[in-house]
Amino acid sequence: ESIRKYLPVIKNRKYDMIFVFEPLPFDSEGFRAENENEEESKKIKNSIFEIYKRLGYNSISVPVMSVEERTGFILEKVLVRKLY
């Protein structure tokens, strides 16, 4: 499916912050169910960043970390924004 069909929905909403999670590494014994490879995963992530950039957002990349660390990373960004 084309991502273009989602653009009208995205354009009608304005978010304070956009977080894009860096993809987890592929592991044949892991829990990821996608059939794409790492190169395809990179393309998808880059497309997401590009779409939000075109819509005027500065997306925040959330690095690969534990769930707790990712949660802390996001909360820190949100709380710092609320202070200013």
Image (cartoon, rainbow, N blue to C red):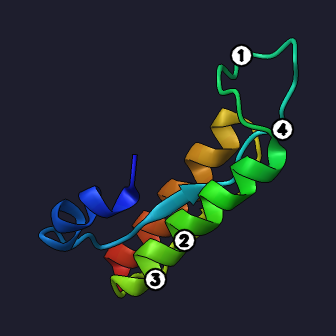
Name the residue that disc number 4 marks.
25
Q: Are marks 1 and 4 in contact (CB under 8 Å)?
A: no
Q: Secondary structure at mark 4?
A: loop
Q: Are marks 2 and 3 in contact (CB under 8 Å)?
A: yes
Q: Badge 1 local density, few (<14 within 10 Å), some, or many (20+)?
A: few
State left or right for residue 40 relative to residue 4: right
Mark 3 or mark 4: whose residue is earlier in sequence: 4
State left or right for residue 64 relative to residue 72: right
* Residue at point 42%, 65% (across, down): 78
Q: Eyeballing the image, is 77 above or below 58? A: above
Name the residue that disc number 2 marks.
49
Mark 2 or mark 1: whose residue is earlier in sequence: 1
Q: Badge 4 local density, few (<14 within 10 Å), some, or many (20+)?
A: few
Q: Eyeballing the image, is 84 above or below 68? A: below
Residue type at mark 3?
Answer: Lys
Residue 31 has which mark? Answer: 1
Residue 81 has which mark? Answer: none
Residue type at mark 1?
Answer: Phe
Name the residue that disc number 3 marks.
53
Work out which residue is located at the far top of the displayed protein and give it: 29
Q: Eyeballing the image, is 60 above or below 2? A: below
Residue 28 shows in this picture: yes
